[in-house]
Image (tube, rainbow, N blue to C red):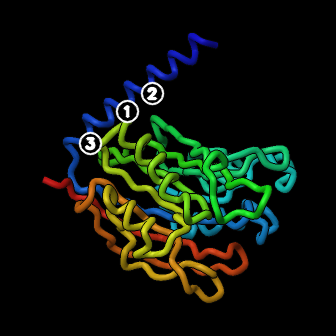
Amino acid sequence: MYRKTISAIAVAIVSIACASELAQAQETIRLKVLSMNIKEGGKMAGYRTSAFADVIKQYDPDVVAMQEVHDRTFFVGGRAWTTELAEAAGMYPLYCKSFDYSGGGFGVAVMTKYPFFASEYIVSPMSTYPSENVKPGRKPEDRSTGWVYMALPDGNVVRVGSTHLSVENDIIIKNMFDVNKKIFAEDTVTPTLLIGDYNAVPGSDQIVYFLRKWQDVSEEIGPTIPSDKPKQKLDYIMGYPKGGWKLEKYEIIAREDLSDHCFIYAEVSYIPVK
């Protein structure tokens, strides 16, 4: 087991190093992405993977970033829900568990049209941070962020991730700090998108903090929640390095039958910053 673990780590390090070298020689990148907070593991859709697979196939994204994903829980009948969805949508999955829940896990997922050659994720220990925004006797939930390295058909390499940040606004910045520390310790070269539910509104201290490092590629996209009458924006597409990303096209997808969040479909481009 020890030898296998060391070998896996070595392969990941080499893969990421190669990705960084390839990233330095990249031309314009074009990417289609879909952000989906699926509300308590797809509860509003009866936990049917087919309901979400239909949306994915309709928009045909290169990457799907999902939040509030159940995997092997009682509610999904113990199924490997992420794998089942990926097979139905014709994609490659990465599931990242935030915490144990109902016999399985609750977390985020990344799915890609093309095979990814390296992946990583972090679980931010939010339950260890004191918060004034939780009920007495309860703790904040741990939060996962996962990402993959994917080679596109034109040879470009991108890193794309899914995140669902803490709902307790007094500790979201701690969550953001954990994510930044891991991502940038690993690689500061490869063009990166971090997509998902940031649980913070535009202009808030939390988003202002995150924008020190990241570009809000979704800046012109409006409110995303609630899906029946969106009033607030909590879902974002963040890009790194800053200044090179451009939002080419987007659609806010309001599916009241599937989630309380609107989904976001976007076509983005990246031109290396000189």
Local crowd size for mark 1, using a 10 Å CA cut-off: few (<14), some (14–19), many (≥20): many
Q: Are marks 3 and 2 in contact (CB under 8 Å)?
A: no
Give the number of the disc on residue 12.
2
Q: Label 1, label 3: how many angstroms apart (C-alpha)?
A: 10 Å
Q: Label 2, label 1: how many angstroms apart (C-alpha)?
A: 6 Å
Single out the residue that lies furthest toward the bottom.
Answer: 229
Q: Are marks 2 and 1 in contact (CB under 8 Å)?
A: yes
Image location (x, y in percent) of residue 171: 55, 58
Give the number of the disc on residue 23.
3
Left or right side of 212 for 3: right
Amino acid type, mark 2: Ala
Left or right side of 136 for 195: left
Q: Label 3, label 2: how many angstroms apart (C-alpha)?
A: 16 Å
* Residue drawn at 61 percent across, 89 percent down: 229
Which quarter of the picture shows residue 85?
Answer: bottom right
Amino acid type, mark 3: Ala
Q: Is residue 87 visible?
A: no
Q: How many marks?
A: 3
Of the image marks 1 and 3, the number of the one nearer the N terminus: 1
Which quadrant: the N terminus? top right
* Residue drawn at 27 percent across, 42 percent down: 189
Q: Is residue 225 above or below residue 81?
A: below
Q: Secondary structure at mark 1?
A: helix
Image location (x, y in percent) of residue 34: 51, 64
